[in-house]
Amino acid sequence: MKEFIEFLENHKIISQLKKQYLKDSNSDENFRFFNNFKKLLSQSSKKRNTNLDGLAYLYEQEVSYHQRKKLGEIYTPRAIVDQILDGVGFYNENSIGSKTIIDISCGAGSFLVQAVKRIINYKRDSSEDLDITGLKSIVQLIKSKIIGIDINPIACILCQINILYELFEIIDSILKEDPSFPIPVFQIENNNIFSHIFNQKYDFIVGNPPYLFIREIPQDQKELIESRKFETCQGQYDYYQLFIEIGIKLLKSDGKLGFIVPDSILALSNRHIIRKYIYDHTIIREISYIGPQFNDPIVSNIILVLQREADCNKIAKNMVNLNLKQNSELISSSILQQHFEDWDYKFLINLNQEDIKILNFLNKNFSKLRHIMEQSKYDIILTRGVELTKEGKIIFCPVCNKFYPLPTGKLICKTCKQELSTHSIETIIVDQKPKNPNDDYAPFIYSINRYQINETKYILLKKQGINYKSPGIYKNRILVRQLTQNNLICATFSRNGYTSQSIYNLGVLKSPVPEFNNLYLLGLMNSELISFYFIKSFGSYKNLYPRILIEKIKELPIKIPQTEYEKKEAKKIAEYVTKVLNVVESNPTLNNQYQIKINQLVYDIYNVRNEERHYIKNFLEKV
């Protein structure tokens, strides 16, 4: 490292890079970073973090994780870099030395440095003795084929130095024979990817794009993104999905992209648009679940390897390689890419062939609840309860002259941004109904179990600003809890009572088929079949039952009885549901027997075969 530092000083490389990338005043914090650069560089040689490449360690020591996360600058472990480079095929004579590779969020160069190492090693392995011409050709190859872009000028400088460090031995050998050899400057561009104009396509695109959700994206960036009319920036988008879209557009035909991204892309509803974009434009070569990889344990990751393809038949017939790391065990399988289209572009990587067969049968033969809700002959409500937590804490804003649910963070009014006082906090959910006749209280369903209202309290109504919803939604309807009970959907029936936003209100208000009613629908909701469908469609690979959300309830396959036989079976389901509601608390054994009957009837009306019934039952017992 000492020799490399002297090399940087003798050739005034730092000052040249500062002049190239830092064009603001000397007061800029970017300049301050370089005041102790030599000292920091020396320290990095002694304390090099083996999970980082080169000077990424230096930058991580000087800039806080929180600040780097704002820019999406979280550097990538070496093992992940190698897995992605292997995944896209950057390792042999067909790729190294002849094809371009770009990282459009390169940071200090973790991916590009490793690509440089592979080029150097390949060239050395393929030649017994490299002369000066051969060494110069390696430098020229890297200058022409390795490209990086980053919004942060400091990261660009460190990336340049990092690549130089990997080439130092080669450059030093060249300079000994040819002192006039110009010190190379690599294609590392300091630019905002959202405003960049690309005039060429690339063979490989790799990287770890920033993970910034729409709420965290600065307003000027949002305006820039919207002005460029990206196809995937609709709704609740994230930076990384825009980087995927840009990356795919930059690929040559048959070019490959390898990214590490959050696993939220797999099945989250607001990632539907990027999943469909991926499906329509690429062959998905690999999806590998690798779990949390960075300082933020909340974010779990996958590696995504894509290949640009325009032929829809090749896309549909492609077999996607799946790798799931669970409890230190690697489970590999494959799945037909067309299945993703069948599942409305959810990437359900946790399914085996039996799961696929059952889901395809349900998806193709039964209407989604949302499709039934769209028909004018039906009137079905599905809504959250009062926009309020179960505890019922509210706070008054004197500027807006209204109440709001108590904020989870700072006491700031979400409308006027006025700071609020703790003295204006009230609780409008109480255990006992007050006797004051001037107070308007109504029953409030505090918690439920399957087929059972577990606890009822009272809610104070008519607090200006609180969204109570229409009183009509709280009468004669099914209640569905966000959280499951023993890995099964948790639903019951209620004739009256407000709920919080964590309990949904589902009601059949009008139906041309009398047998399609609340009691029948409740039987479907609490059945083994629908619970299996739910966990397999939305639970993904984590073996955790997903939180039940309204958007997911709308995707459930619902059987409307049509024939006389089906109507007869539907009536039986409603009858057994009524029996369960009457004995659920007093007679658990009888309750269980009734539920077994409901499960059998639901299987019958959906025409599910016996072997598939056994498979579903065994699966639910295991989870």
Image: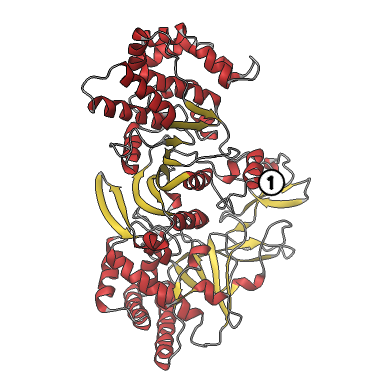
Question: Is residue 364 placed above or below 168 in the rendered structure?
Answer: below
Answer with left or right where residue 159 lies relative to residue 98.
right
Q: Amino acid at mark 1?
A: Lys
Q: Is residue 476 above or below residue 546?
A: below
Dot 1 falls on a residue whose secondary structure is loop
Seen as rendered, the residue at the extreme front is 133
Q: Position of residue 558 (x, y in %)?
A: 45, 76
Q: Which residue is mark 1?
A: 414
Residue in the picture at 68% in, 51% down: 404
Question: Where's residue 36, x and y in %?
Answer: 50, 11
Q: Position of residue 168 (x, y in %)?
A: 36, 16
The N terminus: image quadrant: top left
**Viewer-side residue, 255 vs 50:** 255
Which quadrant holds residue 582? bottom left
Q: Which residue is more in the foreground, 105 or 521? A: 105
Q: Residue at x 34, y 72 (%)?
A: 588
- Indicate the quadrant where residue 499 lies: bottom right
Q: Quadrant of the C terminus?
A: bottom left
232, 434: nearer the viewer: 232
Q: Is residue 451 above or below residue 59?
A: below
Q: State the residue lying farthest toward the left.
A: 128
- For label 1, the crowd category at 10 Å Cα-Cα, with few meaning under 14, some 14 to 19 and many 20 or more, is few
Above or below for 447 versus 260:
below
Is residue 512 shown to the viewer in this render? yes
Residue 93 in picture, x, y percent from top left? 28, 36
